[in-house]
Amino acid sequence: MAQETASLDSSKLARPVAIDWKRGGLRWKISVTFTGLILGLGVLVIGIVYYFTSSALQKQVDLRAQAIATNLADAGAGLASRKGILELDALVAKYGRLDGVAYAFIQDPKGEILASSVQPFPVELKDGGASALLSHTTRLRGKSAYETRAPLLDGQLGVVRVGLWAETVEDDVRATLLPIIGLILACLALGVVLSVMLASKTVRPILDLKAIADDISRGRLDTSVSIQSNDEVGELGRSLERMRASLKAAMVRLNRE
């Protein structure tokens, strides 16, 4: 018996609490409706801003990587043509130390490494030489990198490959997006506060009319209805005033009789 009681109590506690929309007040309904609309619009705006901003930053990263690879190809073409390996190593190492650069190296048309900024050379980067895609994502030491390639002397001497750390790109995206998202969230919070204030201001005349209607239902006919408004609430107030005046006049006639 005790086990059955405990199971019944646990089943009662496990039941979800349902929110009855019909039993909520008008102020609560208006506030929740406006808040939901504002939050939904805010999420949509944040999604759009994130998509377009990240896309624009990604294009900037691609352009930067392409510029680095092209400059390295232009500077290393002469060194590669005369087999200046030491000078080529120094040049590639210089580009490999640039901010956000994961690696930089040069391959000949056969896929052999002429110079590299990463020593020892990672095996995962040996994937096809000059015939591979110009831009793609690679993995280096367990981290992602965005790679861009540039032909060395129109591909006759090989290809230059430059990779940028993906985490650096993501940090730039976050640094750009966080202030924007923070500003949007502040605007959403302000919109929620304004919606609650608007709901209170909208409902206040209706609550006043409700209080007057309660007085009339109790026979208190001396309080006049004064709603200074030209909208539907004002029309309701004037109708209620006419009803109060009519009832009061009827009560006076009945008392005289």
Image: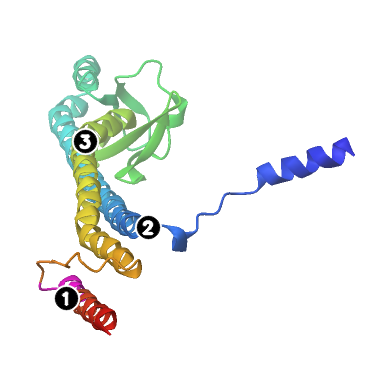
Q: Amino acid at mark 3?
A: Ala
Question: Which percent across, then down, holds residue 15?
Answer: 65, 48
Quadrant of the snapshot with the N terminus = top right
Quadrant of the snapshot with the C terminus = bottom left
Q: Which residues are magenta?
A: 230-238
C-alpha separation, residue under disc 3 versus residue under disc 1 = 73 Å
Q: Secondary structure at mark 2?
A: loop
* Residue at image location 22% in from the left, 57% down from the top: 204
Density class for disc 1 (Cα within 10 Å; few <14, some 14-19, many ≥20) is some
Density class for disc 2 (Cα within 10 Å; few <14, some 14-19, many ≥20) is few
Mark 1 / mark 2, whichever is N-terminal = 2
Q: Secondary structure at mark 1?
A: helix
Question: Which percent across, then down, holds residue 12?
Answer: 69, 46
Q: Are marks 1 and 2 in contact (CB under 8 Å)?
A: no
Q: Is residue 176 left or right of residue 32?
A: left
Q: Is residue 234 magenta?
A: yes
The circle drawn on residue 238 is: 1
Question: Which percent across, then down, holds residue 149?
Answer: 27, 39
